[in-house]
């Protein structure tokens, strides 16, 4: 009986966020050698490959709407010995982009996973912001609904580390207004737009000033990263001894649950094994929840 084939490899390949010159030689080699490319958008990736002079390998879509269903199909190729390159529309896969489910599944199967590092919008923004980057908290996209967005920002208000957010152009004005209101108009911040592209813009100022600047514009376009100074305070400590990281964990859970405090507390309860009522009471004591309950 023939032995099963050796498993292939999953390559997590970073692609340019704008300037094609930022693609590394190793990334180009990985894309050219792959048996299959799992892409967020096969049309954009196909255009990138053609622009690089790479004869396109097989392409399969893997985006946030189909990733869960697509994982098994890609795993079958990996089990059969294929080399699969995972890419997104620009930047590093899994960083506010699809791909983490596929990477996790490959690890569970014992399939080798190798990063091919390169551009990432959050790192590019941090490097140009002039704010402390030895410790930072990447939040990703803020919730689209204002109440959820403000709850998340309130949970981050005393975070001492630099904060990094992604934002969509059509929500930028509203998000900046909420950031200024909740974190303070005088908080230092940097707005990075269209990094590495023709219309690159890096604006440093205060949250209040940036909010007024954007509100005065007719239209904002492009991909946006906001880098915001930390609070300058020591990280708050929960009343219960041993809870110094609870606020940070709650902020992360809020981000994952689109700013819904009830779902965030349920998630924390599952992850920590602590009762929901206890978590809610502690968070109320820290000011992260209103006295009315989990969803206050």
Image (spheres, helix red, strand yellow):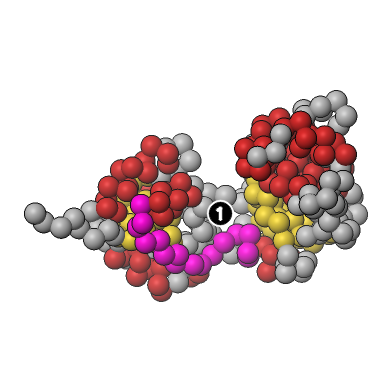
Along the viewing direction, whichever of 87 and 267 lies nearer the viewer: 267
Q: Quick check: can you spot residue 207? A: no
Q: Position of residue 145 (x, y in %)?
A: 71, 32
Along the viewing direction, whichever of 83 and 169 lies nearer the viewer: 83
Q: Residue furthest left?
A: 1
Q: Residue furthest bottom?
A: 25
| Residue in the image at 77% along x and 28% along y | 295
| Residue in the image at 89% along x and 50% along y | 185
Q: Which residue is mark 1?
A: 95
Q: Quadrant of residue 257?
A: top right
Residue 119 highlighted magenta (yes or no): yes
Along the viewing direction, whichever of 1 and 120 lies nearer the viewer: 1
Q: Quick check: can you spot residue 262? A: yes
Q: Residue furthest top?
A: 292
Callout count: 1
Q: Position of residue 111 (x, y in %)?
A: 35, 57
* Residue 145 sits above or below residue 46 on the image: above
* Residue 114 sits above or below residue 109 on the image: below
Quadrant in the picture for the N terminus: bottom left
Question: Helix or strand or loop: what does disc 1 sit on?
Answer: loop
Residue 267 highlighted magenta (yes or no): no
Please provide the residue range marked out in magenta: 109-124
| Residue in the image at 20% along x and 58% along y | 5
| Residue in the image at 63% along x and 59% along y | 122
Query: Horizontally, is 26 left or right of 279 in the view?
Result: left
């Amino acid at each position: 009986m023939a032995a099963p084939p050796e498993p292939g490899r999953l390559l997590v390949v970073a692609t340019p966020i704008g300037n094609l010159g930022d693609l590394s030689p190793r990334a180009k080699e990985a894309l050219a050698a792959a048996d299959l490319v799992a892409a967020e958008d096969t049309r954009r990736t196909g255009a990138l490959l053609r622009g690089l002079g790479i004869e396109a390998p097989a392409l399969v879509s893997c985006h946030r709407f189909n990733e869960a269903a697509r994982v098994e199909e890609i795993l079958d190729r990996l089990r059969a010995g294929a080399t699969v390159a995972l890419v997104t529309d620009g930047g590093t896969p899994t960083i506010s982009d699809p791909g983490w489910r596929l990477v996790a599944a490959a690890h569970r199967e014992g399939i080798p996973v190798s990063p091919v590092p390169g551009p990432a919008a959050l790192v590019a923004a941090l490097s140009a912001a002039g704010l402390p980057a030895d410790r930072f908290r990447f939040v990703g996209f803020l919730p689209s609904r204002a109440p959820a967005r403000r709850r998340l920002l309130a949970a981050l208000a005393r975070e001492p580390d630099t904060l990094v957010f992604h934002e969509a152009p059509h929500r930028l004005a509203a998000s900046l207004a909420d950031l200024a209101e909740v974190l303070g108009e005088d908080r230092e911040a940097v707005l990075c737009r269209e990094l590495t592209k023709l219309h690159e813009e890096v604006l440093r100022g205060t949250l209040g000033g940036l909010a007024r600047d954007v509100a005065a514009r007719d239209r904002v376009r492009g991909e946006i990263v906001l880098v915001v100074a930390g609070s300058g305070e020591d990280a708050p400590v929960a009343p219960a001894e041993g809870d110094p990281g609870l606020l940070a964990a709650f902020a992360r859970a809020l981000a994952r649950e689109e700013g819904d405090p009830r779902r965030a507390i349920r998630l924390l309860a599952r992850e920590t094994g602590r009762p929901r009522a206890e978590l809610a009471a502690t968070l109320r004591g820290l000011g992260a929840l209103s006295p009315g309950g989990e969803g206050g």
